[in-house]
Image (cartoon, rainbow, N blue to C red):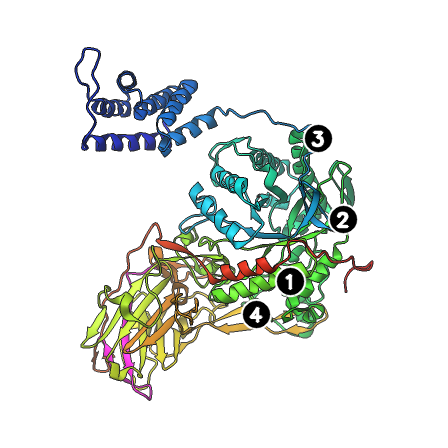
Amino acid sequence: MIPASGLWRLGLACCLAWATAVGAQDTAPAPPSAAGERVDVDALVRGAFVALREGRDEEASRAFGRVLKLAPDYSDAAYGLALIAERRGEAEAAKKAIRLAIRLDDQRPEFHVVLERLLLQAPELPPPQRAEHLVLDYRVSRERGFEVRGAQGFSPLFLKGINLGAALPGKFPSQFPEKPVYQAWIRDMAELGVNCVRVYTIHPPGFYEALAEHNASAEKPIYLIHGVWVEPPPGDDFGDPAWFEPWRTEMHRVVDLLHGRAALPARPGHASGLYRTDVSRWVIAYILGREWEPYNVVEFNALRPGMSDWQGRFVGIDNGHATEVFMARALEALLAYEHDTYHAQRPAAFTNWPTLDPLHHPTEATKAEENALRRRLGLPLEEGAEIREYDNDAVGLDMEKYRDGPELEAGLFASYHAYPYYPDFINLDSGYNRGRDHLGRNNYMAYLQDLVGHHRRHAVVVSEFGVPSSRLVAHWQPQGMTHGGQNEVEQGEQNARMFRNLHDAGTAGGVLFAWIDEWFKKNWLVIEFEQPGERNPLWYNPMDAEQNYGLLGAHPGKEGPNVLIDGKPDDWRGVPDYLRRGDTWLKLRADEGWLHLAIGFPADVSASSMLVGIDTHDLEAGDHLLPLPGGWRSEAGLEFVVRFEGEVARLEVDNVYDIFTHRYARPYRSRHNEDGLFVEPRTESNRARIGRDGTLFPEHRQQIGTLRRGTADRADPAFDSASEWQRGPGFIEARIPWGLLHVTDPSSLQVLRDDVPPGGIGTVTTEGFRVLLVQLDARGAPVGSLPGVVDGRVTLPPLFRWPGWEQPEFHVYRKPSFSIVQRALAALPDQPAMAPLAPEGGAE
């Protein structure tokens, strides 16, 4: 007997709900029975489903069978018979019944769910069709890049790609969207002008079906670059069969499903379903694995020291270290399976990045080298600090050691995730500082030329690049191609510049990161303060670079922004007053991304300054002295203040609660004080470094409290997506990112209240915020407040508590970067400008 699964129960519940609803509606005349009396088949169906739910299968089966005799087109009766047969373990009978239900009503999704579930239990997969002649639709070479077979033979193609991660807000990457979402995305990708899409792992069948449906009628197809994901091996032992064999199995799954021959049962963290759509004709390449950290490679090489050669049918390697030989074996496993099973080949690579590039970088000392240099030069780290960065030039993975095996015709290529801002050597090495492109100085262009110049045997594809439109800069870059800090227009301009750099540097193509903003992602600069981590997908952090790479933005608000920063009070008319006295008022609104605030005041004082004080938790903790002349105090201890002074708005944090000030002296805690000392928060995007020759490179620090004035109205010519506040007649509005207020998870009202080291970053659930408003005169002295002042003390404001949530509301929109990249792709040649081979010895 097949036990009733959660899906089975859901289908039964849906049908019962439907059957109940039918009883409340007008129905067609009941058909006559053999005896001539009228029979209410709707009532029969309702009763049959009740019997089924209560386990009276025989009774239910008789009732459903009678319904089908009386009303042969009654699809729910066939559905009920399918559920009974499934529960009894009669798979063939269940499939027959559910197929009848689908023939009678093809628009019922629960019918298709049952059929797919039955087919996964007993897959009806066609045998593999091994072609008589080798299927070679694509090939790659150092001289011509990628080539696509057409009616006139092979023609070169410059890859203009987009990386697809599919996690919508509220979802983790293994929680995939439905087919209609993929259909819309692929239509939009075609409009964008990309010729390929890259995925890192297996997606649901709907993705492949949507791609095939689009390509079947498209003038220009969208090709697919497919990955085979894997997590690092335990103990960094790539040679462990217990780790490698499951990865080999995953390679087989990928190949089979691309040929339309896979039935993948549900697995935690993975897509599943019946894969019947053959998309192999559009799969242009494979890219194996993920970015390995340097320590993964160092540790495995230490387990198996020495250099060796290895030769397979499709891949060979000369004088490779242990990890390089392992990657040759992994490529062999993938290529051999597709060749032997389907007699097909396509180009393949493994994932690499500048951290493991084969070049030498004099400015990139390892941790051990830098510590030795610091001791020699008498330059100790700041007390409490340590070098936590990876050893980004300790070891490399060199595709130039690899050879095509005797049976490989599709070719190998080098695949790099190469961004312009990391590692630091891209912006510190003196040779790269002399790089130039069509717009002027460009370190990234010089690095690309160096990388391409090294590869004499293999074409180079930069399979990840891009800049995000986040608020914070997580890594500095001298030409402004920073890791965040762009608005959405600047993001598009930088991405367009890099696409042209990739073409002009002689790569075989580039794949832009990324298609959509994904809220589950985390960046090193803020990850410690996004807690609890399992709730990260439930809220949007505009501070986090990793959440803001998309050409499609995903922001809070079901139909659009909850509050449009434009200096107009229209959005606030339905929001109740938080504080009011006469014509002066303060309103607050919370959503998945920001704390919004609005201030109204008489028009004749519109030029005056305002100070907003915010108590985020614990009335006693925080600063009880306002940072103003006059000595006013506050009953609520303030963790933050926001100053609106003329054309400038700035958030400041109580000095004892400032993360940067206390970054090496945890815990981060708000404490009772009355010193009135508030500071603008800062970050350090690039730490100070010492090159291998002893050269000192200073750190890069940023003040991050200043709010950006502008309009977020996309219809306004002055639109700036990074706008955070605006002033109008008698009105000020602002949005403050939760991260600036040390809120670690607004969905569960968590704020930063740190544990004593060495524990993890601690949080506490706030009861809500208390907010006060102080009006200032031209000299910055307080002249009035909400709530009022008694004996020089601002009285206790009311509690502002927002409701938490388990599912975020959001809308998806095209950023301006979409159209900017669209124009850039249209202007970019469709054929690569492959760089000539550098003289022996590599590029300068």
Local packing at callout 1 (Cα closer than 10 Å; few below 14, some 14-19, many 20+) is many
Residue, disc 1: 501
| Residue underneath mark 3 | 133
Asked if the magenta segment contains residue 770, the reply would be yes
Residue at mark 2 to residue at mark 1: CA–CA distance: 26 Å
Residue at left offset 52%, top offset 64%: 491
What's the CA distance linking mark 3 and mark 1?
39 Å
Of marks 2 and 3, which one's residue comes earlier in the chain? 3
Amino acid type, mark 3: His
Q: Position of residue 467 (x, y in %)?
A: 54, 62
Q: Determine the secondary structure under disc 3.
A: loop
The C terminus lies in which quarter of the figure?
A: bottom right
Which of the marked residues, 1 or 4, is nearer the chain's N terminus? 4
Measured Cα–Cα span from mark 4 to mark 2? 35 Å
Residue 299 lies, with reference to residue 709, above or below; the image says above
Residue under label 4, please give it.
480
Tell me if mark 2 has few (under 14), some (14-19) or many (20+) residues whose alpha carbon lies within 10 angstroms of its own: some
Front: mark 3 or 1:
3
Discs 1/4, front = 1
Who's the residue at 53% across and 73% down the image? Answer: 701
Residue 715, by quadrant, is bottom left
Type of amino acid at the residue the image marks with label 1? Asn
Q: For this view, does 788 lie left or right of residue 340?
A: left
